[in-house]
Amino acid sequence: MESSIVRTALVGCGKVGQIHAAALRKLPESDFVAVCDQDMKRATAFAERFGVQPFANLTDLLRDAKPQAILVCTPHPLHAAPVIEAARAGVSALVEKPLAASLTDCDAMLAAARQFGTKLGVISQRRFYEAVRRVKDAIDAGKIGKPILGVFAMFSWRDQAYYLSDPWRGKWDTEGGGVLVNQSPHQLDLLHWFLGEIDEISGYWANLNHPYIEVEDTALAMIRFKSGALGSIVTSLSQRPGIHAKVHVHGSNGASVGVETDRGATFVAGVSEIADPPLNDLWTIPGEEEKLAAFQADDRARFAQVKATTHYHALQIQDFLQAVRDNRRPAVSGDDGRVVVEMFTAIYRSNRERRPIRFPVEAPSTEH
């Protein structure tokens, strides 16, 4: 690419779109030129706020604004169509998590990107947290020996007001799932990133405390990785006050490392707000135990200087735009995103069929 600046547009002018747009305005790599939304009134108001051109559909945006990359912030089951249309126009796409609600859609998106030579990525901004990077670096450096056990636990709260804030939430057809699809993809991605390829998953899901939604509010699962390591997943939407999530990895030499990725994020006035910094909460590498306090102090100081809700999105969007510019693989690719969809699809399928689900998981995946 001749220019170091990437012409960028945004699809979907909802709450998450606001986070992406605010992040785009921070980046020297981005020339943020346009937005589109099927609600033209909303697109116009959004465009006026961010100083870009509004469109009612992607076809007109691609023709007139001529972006080189789009950010897709539509509801999960509506991710595939804009990605495929953009790929046909030679335009790369970064999609808000999850990559899609079904493996059928994932495979169509990946096939289009391969066919037309475009980049496809999915948001997993927690990979860019300093505390998460420390865990990954320690594992890769062999400091815990061989990873033998991974644990993901999330206890969070979503009430009826949250589900009423957007009409698509809480329904199989329009959200694609519940706590597994919406709140858990970041940590599912980290489990896979930390422990590697998956052999099989068995699990259960239920709606135990939210009678006004169709989808699951609770899920449990067990993972066997190809390395022989084991993993566990516990995730729920029934514990006040906000999202509390952690991922721990235990090694063969007796050492363990971990991160609290979420420490009380809440849903305020229709927007998710991160109130406390992600921190390493477990660090028993021999000779490094005393580093834990320093890690936490550094992260608290850093957090006080940034708006975390947009800062880490901006870091990942920056990496994606650089990947488009430099013709390289983005840090979190469409293939990475597909694994997360495989993971929650396997849990849905295991619950229904009462058996472990072997990987790779194939479409169709509209089962729950």
Image (cartoon, rainbow, N blue to C red):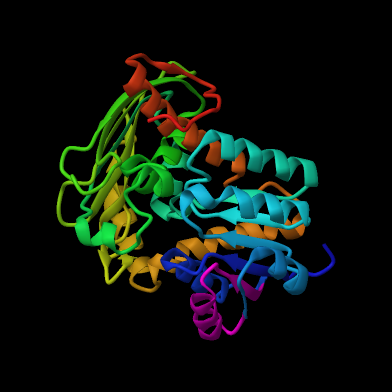
Where does residue 29 sit, x and y in percent of width and height?
Answer: 67, 70
> Count of labels shown?
0
| Magenta-colored stretch includes residue 39 | yes
Q: Is residue 168 left or right of residue 159?
A: right
Q: Quadrant of the N terminus?
A: bottom right
Residue at screen point 78% across, 57% down? 89
Of residue 27 and residue 110, the one placed in the foreground of this image is 110
Residue at screen point 63% across, 67% down? 57
Where does residue 276 sit, x and y in percent of width and height?
Answer: 27, 62
Query: Where 227 falls versus 58 (above or below)?
Result: above
Residue at screen point 68% across, 62% down? 69
Q: Magenta part of the protein: which range?
A: 31-52
- Residue 184 falls in image quadrant: top left
Q: Is residue 260 left or right of residue 125?
A: left
| Magenta-colored stretch includes residue 213 | no
Q: Is residue 27 left or right of residue 213?
A: right
Residue at screen point 66% across, 68% down? 8
Of residue 148 and residue 16, the one placed in the foreground of this image is 16
**Residue most extreme to the right:** 2
Where does residue 248 sit, x and y in percent of width and height?
Answer: 32, 36
- Residue 258 falls in image quadrant: top left
Res 288 seen here? no
- Residue 259 falls in image quadrant: top left
Of residue 25 and residue 63, the one placed in the foreground of this image is 63
Of residue 85 and residue 8, the one placed in the foreground of this image is 85
Q: Is residue 365 left or right of residue 172?
A: right
Query: Where 266 falls versus 282 (above or below)?
Result: below
Where does residue 257 sit, x and y in percent of width and height?
Answer: 34, 38
Query: Where 89 falls versus 203 (above or below)?
Result: below
Q: Quadrant of the C terminus?
A: top left
Res 194 seen here? yes
